[in-house]
Structures are given as C-alpha cells and as structure tokens.
Amino acid sequence: MIHAVIMAGGIGSRFWPMSRRENPKQFLAVTGADTLIQNTLSRLSGIVPHENCYVVTNERYVKQTQDQLPSIPMENILAEPIARNTAPCIAYAAFKIHQKDPDAIIVVLPADHVIGNVRKFHEALKVSIEAAKEERALVTIGIEPDHPATGYGYIQFDPEDSSKEDGLKALFVKTFAEKPNIQTAERFLDSGDFLWNSGMFIWRSDSILEALETHLPDVHSAFLPLENVEPSADDTALVTAAYKACPSISIDYGVMEQAAKVYVVPGSFDWNDVGDWKAVYDLADKGKAGNAIEGNAIVHDASRCLIQAGDKLVAVVGVNDLIVVNTDDALLVCHRDSSQRVKNVVDYLYANQLDQYV
C-alpha cells in the first residue's frame, strides 16, 4: 500500500515574528484560509488515504497537529523528542510503517510547501511511485527551474534518459549540487539538465531502510529496536534513546548523495517552498504599485512592499521593496532581498536569552 509521511518538525525561523517556537510556520495560514500543513494533507487526497498518512513533528506540536489534522489517526502522529534533521525523522517513520506494511511505498513531503497545479503534482507522484516500486530506487521530485535561483539545491539528471516522446518518466540522477551562487545557477539553467531539489521523496520502505543501513548505519541501528515493539505499545523511551544516539544529518547529505540508484521525476507544477517572507510576497495578491497588504495599513508613495499590519495601524511612506510584519509583541522591517537573514534575528534572540520573543 501507499503511505505518506509529512515532515513537520521545523520552527520556520525565517518567518519570524509570525512563526514562533509555540506556533511555527507549518501551522500558519500563509496563503488562503487553510494552514500549510492542512494543504499538504489535502493534496494527498486521491493518492494516499488519510489513515495511511503520518506526521513526524516535535513533541510540543502533537496537540496542534491533532487539532489541525483530525482525520489522521492519533497513532500516526510521531513525536520527536529533539530535532535531528530529516534523516532520523525519515528513519523513525520508515521503521514504524515497515513494521505494519513490509511492502509499503512511502511518499515523504515537507509540511510547508505551496503547490499550484495539483493534477500535475499527482502525475509526478504516480510516476515516482511506479519507479520506486518497479526499480526499487530512491526517487525524488525535481522542479523544472524558470530562473537561476540561488536559494535551492539542484539535481542533475542524465540527459540521455530524457526524451519528450517518452512523456513524464523517472530520470537517473548524476549528481546533487548545493545552493549555488548566481553565476553557477545561470550555468545550471542554461545546461537544461538541472532541476531544483524539492525535498520530496518516494521509495519502498525496505529500500530506504537498506539505504540507511548502508550509508547511515548509526541512524539505522539507533531505530532498529523499534522493529520488536508492538504497534500499540509505548515506545517513548526507545524513541528518545534513538534520537539522542543519532547525529543531526539530512537525508540528502546522508543517503541521497551517496546512494547508487537514485532517480528524479521532473515536476512542471507551480511550486514554492515558502522559505522566507520574500516567497510570501511572490505568492501574494498585489494591488496598486505592487504592494501586498494585509491588515490596517496606510501606504503613501511606496511600492513593491509586503505589509502584514495586524490590528495595529501601520503607515508606510516613501519606501520600496520592504517587508513589514507586525505582531502583538514584535515588529519586523527588512528589505525583501534580505528576508533570508531574518534567521539571524532569531539566532540573536536565542544567544541573548530573549526567549519570550522566539
């Protein structure tokens, strides 16, 4: 059967001050009425039944996850005691699912992406699922780039695998590339054989467990005791011990970049990882002079600004290309092109023990 794992453990520090430790980005309605995690689950309808969907999240977010996703069984909400990046998260879920269904196909999705064309997304998922099942490969979905982005990693595929006559298909991955500078990104775009790394994965449960055992044996051995635990039993102590024993490492670096049989399926759907406030501006409806405004704001002689005023009156005069986000206890003002650096503010707050603002 097909199962899905939604990774929802992050705190979205680049979304400060709206995203906080107690109410992070994935639980916010960034675009439209529903939250990002609700939209992620909704997009799986028709592919994965909700009873086969799992959420891996920090233990402090279990109640929020239950409240926002009531159709997911309580036992499918997997609580992480500490953050250890994506490889331990995926290992935890893979062991739990494999115990229930040794023939499982697992779709792994971040909780906080925005996807525009669900039909095309489903097409890419179906091709990925077939490749994972028939080829026993590790499969990822790559996004066809439309500009030389420097905020994403890239995946290079074998161009000999690619033929428009064959339609949508899984392509052999030649290499993964870290986030490039602008010159390198332009070269990637011009070459025609690079895709953006979306962080979405599809594989058989036995395939990913074998890959973890080969490439991240410490992570695999940490979660191995879960094999002998009855599904209804309390495994909290074992999970806590496993996370404490694991290094903090991503599945990309720890497995995908090392494995021999990795495929990518090109995704031609609208996609945004909503990584910062600039991404929110790009997605937002804009009015006069290119401003995207929510809340009680007065704008005079200003253009291309994102303004989230909340209940407080916010006046913006004679400026361009700003992000202005107001909350009850904090105000962010930054240039749109500096929105990735909002994380530095959060780092400062932690370093100076200003935890009430985090």
Image (cartoon, rainbow, N blue to C red):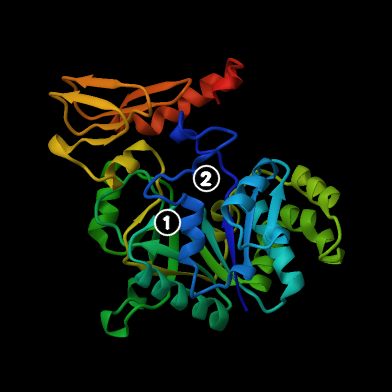
Name the image quarter holding residue 181: top left
Q: Nearer the viewer, residue 70 or 318?
A: 70
Q: Nearer the viewer, residue 172 or 114?
A: 114
Name which residue type carries label 2: Phe
Measured as percent of width and height from the top left, residue 12 is found at 50, 38
Q: Identify the element where label 2 is drawn.
A: helix
Residue 338 on image: x %, y %: 33, 29
In this rendering, which labeled residue sits more in front, label 1 or label 2?
2
Q: Is residue 135 above or below residue 246?
A: below
Counting from the top left corner in percent of width and height, residue 111 is at 51, 53
Instruction: Report the side of 216 relative to 352 (left or right).
Output: right
Q: Is there any visible trace of residue 158 in the rendered image?
A: no
Residue at (27, 79) in percent of width and height = 164
Would you say the residues marked 1 and 2 are in contact, meaning their CB atoms lie under 8 Å apart?
A: no
Please tell me in which quadrant of the rendered image residue 211 appears: bottom right
Q: Secondary structure at mark 1?
A: strand
* Residue on which the image places disc 1: 197
Residue lying at 26% horizontally and 60% vertically, measured from the top left = 191
**Residue that mark 2 sits on:** 27
First of labels 1, 2 by sequence position? 2
Q: Is residue 106 visible?
A: yes
- Quadrant where the N terminus sits is bottom right
